Image: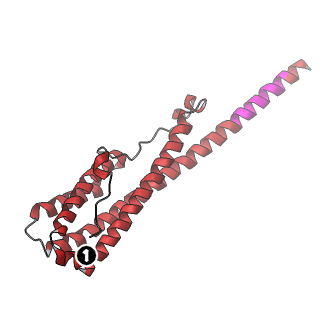
Amino acid sequence: MEFLVIVGVIVLLVVIAGIYLWATYNSLVTLNVRVDEAWSDITVQLKRRADLLPNLIEAVKGYAAHEKQVFENVTKARAETLSAQGPAEASAAENHMQQALKSIFAVAEAYPQLQASQNFLQLQGELVDTEDKIQASRRFYNGGVRELNVKIKQFPNTLFVRGLGFTERDFFEVADSAAIAEPPRVQF
C-alpha cells in the first residue's frame, strides 16, 4: 500500500511538472510570435516612411536644388533604414534618419512657397502619421520583448527555457535618445 502511495505521488508530481512545462513552452511560443509580429510592424512603418522620402525630397528639391548634401544625407539614411537587420541596426539607422529629417525640414523652413505647397503639406501630414505609428509600433515591440524576457528570466523557467531554444530579445532602443526626444518638426 505504501508503495502505491509513493508511486501515485511521483506520478502526480510528474504530471504537474509536465503540465507546467507544456504551459510554459506554449506561453513562450506565444510571446515569441508576438515579438516577431511587433518587429514586423516596425519594419512596415519604417518602409512606409522610407517610401515617403523620395516624394518629400522631390518636393523640396524643386525649391532648394542647391541643397545637395541634405538630399544625399536623407537618401543615405533611407537606404540604411531599409537595409537594417534587427533592433540594433534599426536603432542606429533611426538616429541617422532623425538627423536627416531635421535637416530637410530646416531647409524647407527657408522657402515659404514650399511651406504653402499642397503636395508638401500632404507629405508632411503623412510623415507625421507615420512617425506616430513608428513610435506606437516600437512601444508594442518593446512591451512584447519585456514580457518575453521576464518569462525567460523567471525561476524556475530560467533553468530550462534556453535549452528549449528561447533566448532573450533586444529592445529597440535608440543610442542617442536626445536626437529623438522630440520628433522632427514638420508643422509649419
Q: Is residue 78 above or below residue 171?
A: below
Q: Is residue 42 visible?
A: yes
- Amino acid marked by disc 1: Phe
Where residue 134 appears, as percent x and y from the top left, is: 39, 59
Say what secondary structure mark 1 lies in: helix
Read off the magenta span. Answer: 6-18
Residue 8 highlighted magenta (yes or no): yes
In the rendered image, the residue lying farthest to the bottom is 118
Residue 52 highlighted magenta (yes or no): no
**Foreground pick, 24 / 99:** 99
| Residue at numbered disc 1 | 120
Question: Which quarter of the image is occupied by the N terminus?
Answer: top right
Q: Nearer the viewer, residue 51 or 15?
A: 51
* Residue farthest toward the right in the current orientation of the protein: 1
Q: Residue at x 50, y 43 (%)?
A: 146
The picture quadrant where one finds residue 49 is bottom left
6 left or right of 109? Answer: right
Q: Position of residue 79 (x, y in %)?
A: 23, 58
The C terminus, quarter of image: bottom left
| Residue placed most toward the observer, 101 or 161 | 101
Majority secondary structure in the magenta region: helix
Q: Is residue 51 left or right of residue 34?
A: left
- Residue 101 image point, x, y percent: 24, 60
Find residue 74 and report its image quarter. bottom left
Residue 40 seen from this side: no
Q: Is residue 58 above or below residue 134?
A: below
Q: Is residue 12 rendered to the left or right of residue 164?
A: right
The answer to which quarter of the image holds residue 44 is bottom left
Q: How is the image coloured?
A: secondary structure
